[in-house]
Amino acid sequence: MYTIFQRANIAEPALFGPSDTTSKVEHFPEICISTFSSNIIDKFSSLDGVEKIAELYSANGALPVYKIQYKDREIAFYRSMVGAPACVSCFEEIVAMGAKKFVLFGSCGVLNDEQVKNKIILPVSAVRDEGTSYHYIAPSAEINADERSVQILEQVLLQCGYSFIKGKTWTCDAIYRETISAIEERRQEGCLTVEMECASMLAVSKYRQVPFIQFLYGADNLSSDTWEIRDLALHGLNNAEKYMVLAFECGLAL
């Protein structure tokens, strides 16, 4: 029996797609931003002039989609669900609504604290230790980020004056199965971080041909003998403005 992990070709067409489940939204902004932090989304959705323009629906309930004005441009934003399948499903439906450019950011586990500490992480590739990406791109150990998107993010980070590091991330489906041996193996392979969505989002954005940028910020530390929770419990609230404005600037530059 062959599973999706052994199939060299991606079968076409799908029985149904996102446009069959999600209606196009009139005048949906071209640029859409997303993050996983309710704290950050709640902070920005409460600002004056922000408008709810749509909702994403699932058995978990409805996720509001908002519109904000930034430098005379309308930009959509919403909270992504955690984990590759849910994150990718939200992205697919947002594109069906009308988004044409996409920026995603979120926290990650740090595998090399010495290199990453206090820096924005710019993923140039991701280890595909998850399942969703294999439904969009043929099997491979890793997937590379789009070179143009990497260059744009790097230029925006330089213009904003933020310290950053480029490197490989490890996308893993099982947060509670990041074993000590696997962490060491991925660190030896050059992975700076671990998270749950990047490989899948790189795959679906390539498949749908949607310009895509993702950046990460370190939260918990997995590079020492004991796990350090650090900023994980605050979900990015300490630097909400920094991350959102950086995402807005990336969206404008895409």
Image (cartoon, rainbow, N blue to C red):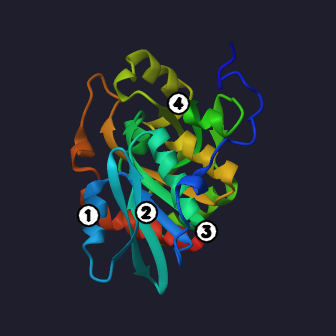
Q: Residue at 75%, 35% (x, y): give it.
A: 11
- Of mark 1 and mark 4, the one earlier in the sequence is 1
Query: Disc 1 vs disc 3: which is toward the camera?
Result: 1
Q: In this figure, which residue is indicated by the disc labeled 1?
A: 42
Helix or strand or loop: what does disc 4 sit on? loop
Comparing 112 with 92, the one in front is: 92
- Of mark 2 and mark 1, the one earlier in the sequence is 1
Helix or strand or loop: what does disc 2 sit on? loop
Real-space Cα separation, disc 3 to disc 2, in angstroms = 19 Å
Which amino acid is tagged 3? Leu
Q: Residue at 53%, 70% (x, y): give it.
A: 31
CB atoms of marks 4 and 3 within 8 Å: no
CB atoms of marks 4 and 2 within 8 Å: no
Query: Label 3 neighbourhood size at 10 Å, few (<14), some (14-19), many (20+)?
Result: some
Q: In this figure, which residue is indicated by the disc labeled 2?
A: 162
In the picture, residue 137 is in which quadrant? Answer: top right
56 left or right of 191 in image: left
Looking at the picture, how far across and down is residue 65, in whole percent?
39, 65
Real-space Cα separation, disc 4 to disc 3, in angstroms = 27 Å
Which amino acid is tagged 4? Glu
Helix or strand or loop: what does disc 3 sit on? loop
Looking at the picture, how far across and down is residue 226, in whole percent?
26, 24
